Amino acid sequence: MSSNENNMHDGDINDLIEKSKSHEQLQYLYNIYETQYNETIQNINNYSKIITELLNSIKILENNESIGNNDVFINMGNSIYANAKIEKMDKILVDAGSHYILEKNIDEAKAFINLKLKKFEKTIEIFNKNKTEIRDILFKISYKLSMISVDQNHKH
């Protein structure tokens, strides 16, 4: 979405909030944005976990000499681990996505992981920006809801 489209959308939601006099409509809108906010936080947490795993992979690759000829535990999925011995670690396999596996040397693998890190960090930046925008909308809706409640209390 272009910034111009985004600004139009922001203007539309701001107009809707400002013009609304219905507590139910605003509460419905609040629930929608609250769900988006929570999903955005969950996405940030998920990507943060991926980044942590990638950083751990880089640490392992940087210490690859100490791994050779040692026993290691391999995660086979679903909390099942196997004991294995790595004889040499001059080539490793990396998941390039879409079920493609590439063989890389240690330096190539670190460079590949660093590219992935940059991509995920950029994604988190976008999510954080969206989170801030959604939080601002939630604040505006909350404020408008409180104004409606005050008006209704004064009428009674």
Image: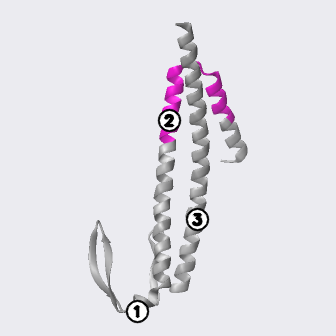
Q: Considering the numbered disc 1 on the image, is that residue within a helix, a strand or a loop?
A: loop
The answer to whether residue 96 is seen in the rendering is no
Q: Amino acid at mark 1?
A: Lys
> Disc 1 designates what residue?
88
In percent of the image, x 67 and y 28: which residue is there? 15
In percent of the image, x 29 and y 65: which residue is there? 78
Residue 152 included in the magenta stretch of the image: no
Q: Which label is found at residue 149?
A: none
Over which residues does the magenta segment extend?
Answer: 11-36
Q: Considering the numbered disc 3 on the image, is that residue within a helix, a strand or a loop?
A: helix
Q: What secondary structure predominates along the stretch shown in magenta? A: helix
Image check: 74 left or right of 89? left
Instruction: Give the alpha-carbon distance from disc 1 to disc 2, as whole Å.
Output: 53 Å
Q: Earlier in the sequence, mark 3 or mark 1?
A: 1
Q: Which label is found at residue 119?
A: 3
Instruction: Give the alpha-carbon distance from disc 3 to disc 2, as whole Å.
Output: 28 Å
Image check: 61 left or right of 143? left
In percent of the image, x 32 and y 77: which residue is there? 74
> In the depicted view, which residue is nearer to us: 102 or 121?
121
What crowding class fits label 1: few (fewer than 14 Cα within 10 Å), some (14-19), or many (20 or more)? few
> Disc 2 designates what residue?
32
The answer to whether residue 54 is seen in the rendering is yes
Residue extending furthest toward the top: 156
Q: Amino acid at mark 3?
A: Lys
Where is residue 155, by image quadrant? top right
